[in-house]
């Protein structure tokens, strides 16, 4: 088997604040044939993840920083085109983390064979992927959501948020969402939220109070935090007794060069005996099988609906997609389908 | 039985920021004989509690505000002198919440008969009282302290802090304490802390880092927070994976007229999957029997040592004691023994 041509993104510089174009470079490369224990994959769709911003920085966060001049890793779904591992036949749909690139050479131990391969590849990055499972774990294990709870989720039109809204409604909660544009607010309502607001329309504190009044609630039992900052302070202000705040992300500060002050009202956590807890998916992988089966059923039933923003341009479009994600232009899961410059799927194998 | 004379403190105005003398008044009153279902108590020792500051303010916190012109309530231990309830004989040592006053008329349902009445009355307000049990609940139920954990406690020379230090050592933790004077730091070390620092000696962040180095630890598994503010931010900065922050009090902001910014590094709670949780004793009263027996045993064994600051002046001294507590002059549990102007115990009954 000869090498095949591919393109991939390398990290060239560590961004300060908002990333700039010179921080990355798209390069041509060759992907050799697999050696024993490896597979070669033609990628179908790549993920664009907010946490990649953290990995581009040099400081250790929860994920290892990307080395300079190395490929930027992100979850990617593709079909195996060449296999030198007997457990992974050619044509298998797999998930791996081997880069923003068209074709990947991956050790067999680092691919996950995807069940439910009749569902679209992007679904495996969204509802069935990291954001979907993050929503599930945050709601069930961290917030311990109960039927009847009043839940607020920020960034409700995002990949995690759209899933939180839908799962929480299915679990019997009253759901309030916030988002950053009228279109996003409409989406959040369409997904079943009892009410939603655009956080540009006033102070989050006032908007959240009004939303609570609109749904006839006194306060929050659960806040699913994707943004931190003003949202977190506004939520702490209205927690009910024994409320749970699941800290999933703080997009309001990912691009800040300087630390931002935290909520000025944490004393409320004592008065209300409330809990604020950060979490990472990697501690909860034991729930993956249960989660996957439940979510796949919900998707097939139409009970939970995939929401994707597909960015154009194939691998070359990934950087614009990432900036679009950070700039708030995407709704639901942001993905980059891998296509030729003509928009056709990359050459793979028959039937895949 | 005739009425008896007593003195008591009334709230006259709601303080803004630091309380002032005109906010309260000591008045003479008469305490009538008990009617059926009541007991009359000569008080032996009154508590001075930080949370009283919150109840003096008009805003609902976790405890009801004191009404204006009503007695200021606080835990008080005394002997029953007159009983009109068959279950509470004269001479019984009881705990009640009926005010900063010399003598109290109390419904039988609102007194708690104290076991271990051979221990000093002040012990029932300290190690066996609210602060002792707060330390216990915070460590066992909120922080879920394990042997080998590295624990940091602020206000470590206070009523709760001195107990946290001692219990945590008994549970096998490495203990770091902070306090506000060299004398307090010495006390904290004497109580068994592995190291302690005076937070006036630099930034809490630097002092805490140095303390961690001194005990050979990388970070904190538990932070028992009594003060909030800079301490909380410094602790969040060095949490280990799966750390627990028990929010017990925020003395750094009780006297602030304006809200203070919170920790600027809550993102760390996500990276470290850490939990921050507020709690109130009232949710954990089911553990009182277990706590009381264990603590009484520790006291008798000498394994845990009572630390009291006794303020002079009898009931008239309570206001100065409270200001002393808020101003940081006390160590351990702040109490006011009730004595005559000559320093003698108030007249009670034979043997009590």
Image: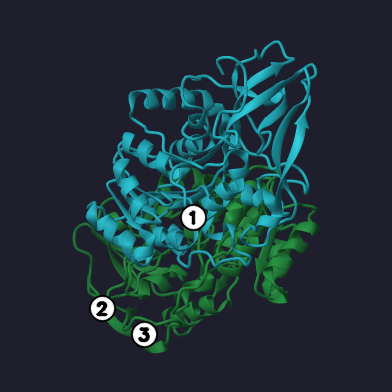
Chain colours: A cyan, B green
Q: CA distance from mark 3 to mark 1?
A: 42 Å
Reading the chain from its start, which is encountered first: label 2 or label 3?
3
Secondary structure under badge 2?
A: strand
* Marks 2 and 1 share the same chain: no
Determine the residue positioned at 41% across, 38% down: A307
Image location (x, y in percent) of residue A186 = 31, 49
Instruction: Write down the residue under mark 1.
Output: A227
At label 3, counting other C-alpha atoms closer than 10 Å, the crowd grade (few under 14, some 14-19, many 20 or more) is: some
Q: Please give the label number shown on residue A83.
A: none
Determine the residue positioned at 62% across, 47% down: A52
Q: Quadrant of residue A269?
A: bottom left
Determine the residue positioned at 70% across, 51% down: A24
Instruction: Write down the residue under mark 2.
Output: B30
Taking the view exactly as shown, the residue that stands out farthest to the front is: A342
Taking the view exactly as shown, the residue that stands out farthest to the left is: B36
* Marks 3 and 1 share the same chain: no
Secondary structure under badge 3?
A: helix
Image location (x, y in percent) of residue A244 = 43, 48
Question: Do the numbered discs 3 and 1 sit on residues whose CB atoms are within 8 Å?
Answer: no
A167 and A54: which one is in front? Answer: A54
Question: Do the numbered discs 2 and 1 sit on residues whose CB atoms are within 8 Å?
Answer: no
Total tally of numbered discs in the picture: 3
* Chain name for mark 1: A
Instruction: Write down the residue under mark 3.
Output: B23
Nearer the camera: disc 2 or disc 3: 3
Q: Is residue B223 above or below residue A66?
A: below
* Marks 2 and 3 share the same chain: yes
Nearer the camera: disc 2 or disc 1: 1
Q: CA distance from mark 2 to mark 3?
A: 22 Å
Q: Is residue A218 above or below residue A113?
A: below
């Amino acid at each position: 088997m000869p090498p095949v041509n591919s393109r991939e993104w390398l990290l060239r510089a560590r961004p300060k604040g908002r990333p700039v174009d010179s921080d990355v470079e798209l390069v041509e490369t060759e992907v050799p044939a697999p050696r024993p224990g490896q597979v070669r994959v033609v990628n179908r769709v790549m993920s664009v993840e907010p946490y990649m911003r953290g990995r581009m920085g040099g400081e250790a966060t929860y994920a290892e920083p990307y080395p300079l001049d190395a490929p930027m890793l992100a979850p990617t779904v593709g079909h195996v085109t060449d296999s030198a591992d007997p457990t992974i036949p050619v044509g298998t749909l797999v998930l791996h983390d081997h880069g923003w690139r068209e074709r990947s050479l991956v050790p067999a131990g680092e691919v996950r064979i995807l069940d439910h391969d009749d569902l679209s590849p992007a679904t495996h990055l969204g509802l069935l992927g990291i954001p979907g499972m993050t929503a599930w774990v945050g709601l069930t294990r961290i917030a311990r959501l109960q039927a009847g709870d009043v839940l607020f989720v920020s960034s409700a039109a995002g990949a995690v948020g759209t899933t939180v809204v839908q799962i929480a409604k299915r679990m019997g909660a009253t759901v309030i969402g916030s988002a950053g544009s009228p279109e996003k607010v409409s989406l959040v309502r369409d997904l079943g939220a009892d009410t939603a607001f655009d956080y540009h329309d006033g102070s989050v504190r006032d908007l959240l109070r009004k939303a609570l009044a609109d749904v006839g609630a006194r306060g929050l039992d659960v806040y699913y935090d994707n943004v931190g900052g003003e949202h977190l302070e506004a939520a702490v202000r209205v927690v009910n007794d024994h409320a749970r705040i699941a800290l999933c992300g703080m997009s309001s500060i990912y691009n800040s060069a300087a630390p931002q002050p935290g909520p000025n009202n944490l004393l409320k956590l004592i008065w209300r005996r409330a809990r604020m807890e950060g979490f990472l998916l990697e501690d909860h992988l034991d729930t993956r099988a249960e989660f996957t089966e439940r979510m796949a059923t919900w998707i097939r039933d139409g009970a939970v609906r995939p929401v994707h923003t597909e960015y154009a341009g194939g691998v070359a479009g990934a950087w614009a997609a990432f900036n679009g994600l950070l700039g708030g232009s995407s709704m639901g899961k942001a993905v980059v389908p891998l296509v030729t410059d003509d928009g056709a799927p990359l050459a793979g194998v028959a039937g895949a």
